[in-house]
Amino acid sequence: MRTAVTAKNDIISAIGNTPMVKLEKIVPDDCADIYVKLEYLNPTGSYKDRMVLAIIQEAEKRGVLKPGMTVVECTAGNTGTSLAFVCSAKGYRFKAISSDAFAKEKLQAMRLFGAEVELLSNEGRGITPDLIPRMIKHVQKLSTQEGFYWTKQFENTDALAGFREMGKEILTQITQPINVFCAGVGTAGMLTGVSQELKQANPATQVVVLEPASAALLAQGIPGSHKVDGIGVGFVPPLLKQAAYDAVRMIEEPEARRIAKLLASEEGILAGTSSGLNVSAAIALGKELGPGHAVVTVACDSGLKYLSSGLFD
């Protein structure tokens, strides 16, 4: 018998309430249970939909974002796609500052949702420590013009409301105690918001921050280049200061890519490189904990956004 599904009032109301799955095939026998929150099932295929909706709604409530204004932000693609989507639904113009270092599919998605996209060239060097700061400086200049609203995703605490909802969902979806929550950080909004809810429910839950080993700024104070969209931004994100995290782990990028492929072929989870990095760390942590424990992580975005990037070659 089919369960009736209530229709959504509008496309924005489809954000959130994503499913949680327990991995079955790529987890070794001596490992804790590994749970993955499927955030790529949000409308634009990423968890950034939650952040953007919270930021835009709070700006509207305060009156700093008004009809006729243009929203502007620098973005690796997921935030920009979410902003383009929400702005389109709400009737705002959106201008994205991005780079040719990021996935082509994300850049195209922003345009399809109606965004104006300006690209800064990084000359094929990948995501270097100077790239995001350079993009921020560029958008900062734009935001001084009348009629622009800069969402300031790297420091905007409005984002936490959206991700605290995600934390609440996780707590209702897993019946056993959560021993570890781990995730890579870009703005750090997701890790911070989720960890606040998990720590409030159970202070014993360990929160582990992840970053690419080639860009170990948080673990070793060494900025570096990498090709994992959305994380390892080259500076300590301000929102991370509000996260009561317990440890930082470095994950090798080839391992993240290997796990991303296995997630697709073995578990049916088609997700991006940062998701592979998250699950790689979750399995490593799960092996250290052993059976009878639970590790939770996130499939941040859809692997469909990376088909031309070489991830699945």
Image: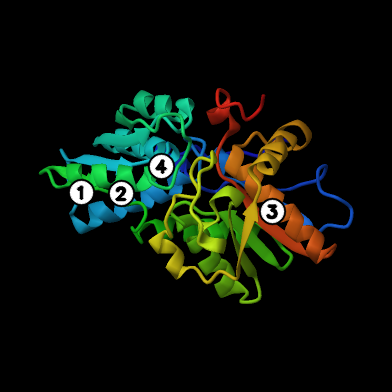
- CB-based contact (under 8 Å), mark 2 and mark 1: yes
Residue designated by label 1: 65
Amino acid type, mark 3:
Ala
Amino acid type, mark 1:
Leu
Amino acid type, mark 2:
Ile
- CB-based contact (under 8 Å), mark 3 and mark 1: no
- The label nearer to you, 3 versus 1, is 3
Residue ID at (48%, 30%): 103
Residue designated by label 3: 281
Which quadrant does the N terminus fall into?
A: top right
Left or right position of 274 against 193 = right
Pick the front one: 271 or 138: 138
Task: Determine the residue located farthest toward the left in the rendered image.
Answer: 146
Sequence-earlier tag: 4 or 1:
1
Sequence-earlier tag: 3 or 2:
2
Give the distance between the C-alpha atoms of the residues marked 2 and 1, in whole angstroms. 8 Å
